[in-house]
Amino acid sequence: MSIISYFNKRREQKRRLRQLGEIGGVFHSLDQCEEGGLVAFDKKNRRLFIEEPLAVVMMSGGAEKWQTFMHNCFTWLYYRQCSEAWEAFIRKEELVAVRKATKQYAAMTRADIERVRRARRTEIGESDMEPPKVEPFEFFVVREKSENSEYSENSENSDSRKAVPGGEILAVGSYEPETERLEMAAWEDVAVFLRKEDE
């Protein structure tokens, strides 16, 4: 190996490590945002809810920063989806291996079962599992409390036991990860079309 190819290889390794560190930092930040209630994901309907303060900070950097934020959100959500799919696949494969082993050997201790599970886990390669499909998601920018809220503290009907903390949708959009296409509109504009469709 020549000195030049050695340095090129080392440079590429450092670049990849730096990139992984940046991705890890982004995931950690989004995890903290989720814990703090600034983002929430509805897995069933593939909808991401973003609280107004976070959206304002991300949008204040311009269109490119907002696009990067959406891409980071997708990467974070897709990583989770892959992790969940991988764990489910591993559990299923371990269960099949344990069932096979219990048919072959009459009496198995808990330690034997763990050995069978570990052995099957080490046999599985990443290529054995089909990765989840890359899908777009919708997002909603939500303001904490509407000025006209029926649950307003000044309302005569206000009952603190029945009051539900509500939010008001400010903007709605969608993100297509494969093309990195981002569409967004004010909720007022979209709501007009939704009402027309209902009529």
Image: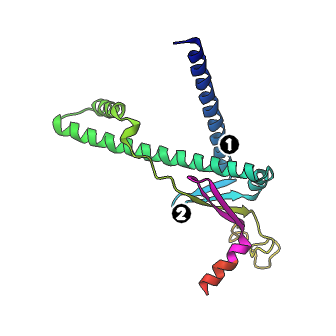
In the image, residue 156 lies at what x, y percent?
Answer: 80, 79
Q: Nearer the viewer, residue 85 or 33?
A: 85
The quarter of the picture where residue 152 lies is bottom right
* Residue at 40% across, 46% down: 130
In the image, residue 26 lies at what x, y percent?
Answer: 66, 41
Is residue 96 shown to the viewer in this render?
Answer: yes
57 sits to left or right of 106: right
**Badge 2: few (under 14), some or many (20 or more) residues near its Cα, within 10 Å?**
few
* Residue at 63% across, 45% down: 31
Q: Is residue 193 magenta?
A: no
148 sits to left or right of 132: right
**Badge 1: few (under 14), some or many (20 or more) residues near its Cα, within 10 Å?**
few
**Amino acid marked by disc 1:** Ser
Quadrant of the drawing holding the C terminus = bottom right
Q: Is residue 170 magenta?
A: yes
How far is the residue under mark 2 from the one under mark 1?
Answer: 23 Å
* Residue range (magenta): 169-191
Q: Nearer the viewer, residue 198 or 165?
A: 198
**Amino acid marked by disc 2:** Asn
The residue that mark 2 highlights is 45
Disc assigned to residue 29 = 1
* Residue at 59% across, 25% down: 12
160 sits to left or right of 100: right
Q: Secondary structure at mark 2?
A: loop
56 sits to left or right of 88: right
Q: Secondary structure at mark 1?
A: helix
Q: Earlier in the sequence, mark 2 or mark 1?
A: 1
The quarter of the picture where residue 50 lies is bottom right
Please determine whether, in this image, residue 195 is positioned above or below residue 57. Answer: below
- Secondary structure mostly seen in the magenta stretch: strand
